[in-house]
Image (cartoon, grey):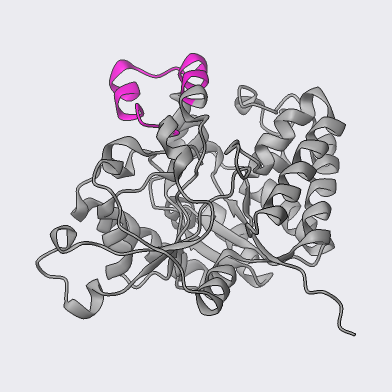
């Protein structure tokens, strides 16, 4: 008798660098592109190797373009992980860009990622989870298989209020970021994968019928079924500041709901999940940074082990391919108002 097969899940890491956090926060000095990749990448790769996990790293093109980061980025590809596109400049207001600027942003990141790793990305995650019909159109035109930029949660307005309260942004910078983390309505977006299809009015005049009929798989970042509160690991670690036991109980409950609702979770990591403020004192403002890295890794290890015991964990690209080949995915049209309303933190 065959053992019951585990349901599938996916795991990714948004490789946001120190400068990108400083830039979004409004801190001076980000223009010199300070980097912690030489510290965090070996630490993350060792953590994943110990668990025999292969995941997706969404890489910022600007980091791939800088020689000081290239050895760390190459080591990710050498370890067998999928490389995704996380834009070039990592600006959370990508949804406000003109389509031609979006094209340049995605193409420039592609070129640098391919030059350093040899991989052509098939997946994209917008910085700050920002997306729009124009972003989706560019991805389709450029042959991407999946997008992973939606984050269905009701807590966006609260996260934005906290972010503005702790940031050093000018009024003009706040205006750019006014849609950051999305609106309450975003909590009603689907948790399970689906496909995007653009309407005739959203297509460019130069798009061929063959290209515009292509469908793009959307792999939402999973939030807790029914409640739609975040369950990614940065949030779990933030709860761990108050009680590691409570944080793990919360995560265990989230996985139970995923199984009960037949949700195949696609969860994500961030570099700061592997770092404490002793590693990067400049980012001490970030939630959860009061935990030293050793305690973070202990909580993170237990949470990831829980995930692996209950699910077969894949890179996001493999997850997208598998789910699209085994079931007929719903087809959704992006609403134009998302262009102005949706952007989440990465």
**Residue at screen point 54% across, 65% down:** 83
Residue situated in front as seen by the camera: 60 or 160: 160
**Residue at screen point 47% across, 73% down:** 328
Q: Is residue 293 visible?
A: no
The image quadrant where one finds the N terminus is: bottom right
In the displayed structure, 140 sits above or below 20; it is below
Q: Horizontal placement of 142 versus 122: left or right?
A: left
Q: Horizontal placement of 67 versus 212: left or right?
A: right
**Residue at screen point 46% across, 54% down:** 125
Task: Write down the quadrant of residue 85 in the picture.
Answer: bottom left
Residue situated in front as seen by the camera: 285 or 147: 147
Q: Residue furthest left?
A: 205
In the displayed structure, 336 sits above or below 64; it is above
Q: Horizontal placement of 207 versus 81: left or right?
A: left
Residue situated in front as seen by the camera: 66 or 92: 92
**Residue at screen point 23% across, 46% down:** 336
Task: Write down the quadrant of residue 226 in the picture.
Answer: top right
Residue situated in front as seen by the camera: 61 or 325: 325
Q: Is residue 306 visible?
A: yes
Q: Residue furthest right?
A: 1
Q: Count the marks: how many?
A: 0
- Residue 161 colored in magenta in the image: yes
Task: Write down the quadrant of residue 180 in the picture.
Answer: top left
* Residue 151 placement (x, y as % from top left): 49, 44
Give the magenta part as a residue range: 160-181
* Residue 242 placement (x, y as % from top left): 79, 22
- Residue 98 colored in magenta in the image: no
In the displayed structure, 101 sits above or below 6; it is above
């Amino acid at each position: 008798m065959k053992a019951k097969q585990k349901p599938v899940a996916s795991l990714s890491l948004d490789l946001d660098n120190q400068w990108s956090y400083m830039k979004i926060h409004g801190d001076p000095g980000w223009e010199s592109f300070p980097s912690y990749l030489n510290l965090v990448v070996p630490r993350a790769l060792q953590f994943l190797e110990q668990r025999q996990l292969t995941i997706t790293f969404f890489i910022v093109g600007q980091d791939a373009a800088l020689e000081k980061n290239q050895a760390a980025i190459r080591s990710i590809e050498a370890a067998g992980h999928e490389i995704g596109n996380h834009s070039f400049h990592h600006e959370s207001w990508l949804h406000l860009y003109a389509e031609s600027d979006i094209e340049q942003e995605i193409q420039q990141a592609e070129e640098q990622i391919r030059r350093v790793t040899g991989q052509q990305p098939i997946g994209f995650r917008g910085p700050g989870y920002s997306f729009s019909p124009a972003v989706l159109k560019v991805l389709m035109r450029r042959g991407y298989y999946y997008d992973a930029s939606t984050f269905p949660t009701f807590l966006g307005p609260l996260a934005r209020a906290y972010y503005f309260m702790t940031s050093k942004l000018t009024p003009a910078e706040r205006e750019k970021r006014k849609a950051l983390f999305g609106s309450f309505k975003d909590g009603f977006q689907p948790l399970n994968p689906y496909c995007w299809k653009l309407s005739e009015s959203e297509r460019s005049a130069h798009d061929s019928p063959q290209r515009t009929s292509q469908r793009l798989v959307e792999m939402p970042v999973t939030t807790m079924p029914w409640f739609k509160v975040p369950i990614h690991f940065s949030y779990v670690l933030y709860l761990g500041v108050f009680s590691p036991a409570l944080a793990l109980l919360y995560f265990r409950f989230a996985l139970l709901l995923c199984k009960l609702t037949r949700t195949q979770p696609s969860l994500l990591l961030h570099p700061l999940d592997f770092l404490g403020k002793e590693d990067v004192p400049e980012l001490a403002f970030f939630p959860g940074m009061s935990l030293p890295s050793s305690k973070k890794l202990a909580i993170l290890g237990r949470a990831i082990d829980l995930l692996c015991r209950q699910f077969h964990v894949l890179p996001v690209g493999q997850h997208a391919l598998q789910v699209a080949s085994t079931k007929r995915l719903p087809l959704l049209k992006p609403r134009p108002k998302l262009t102005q309303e949706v952007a989440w933190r990465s």
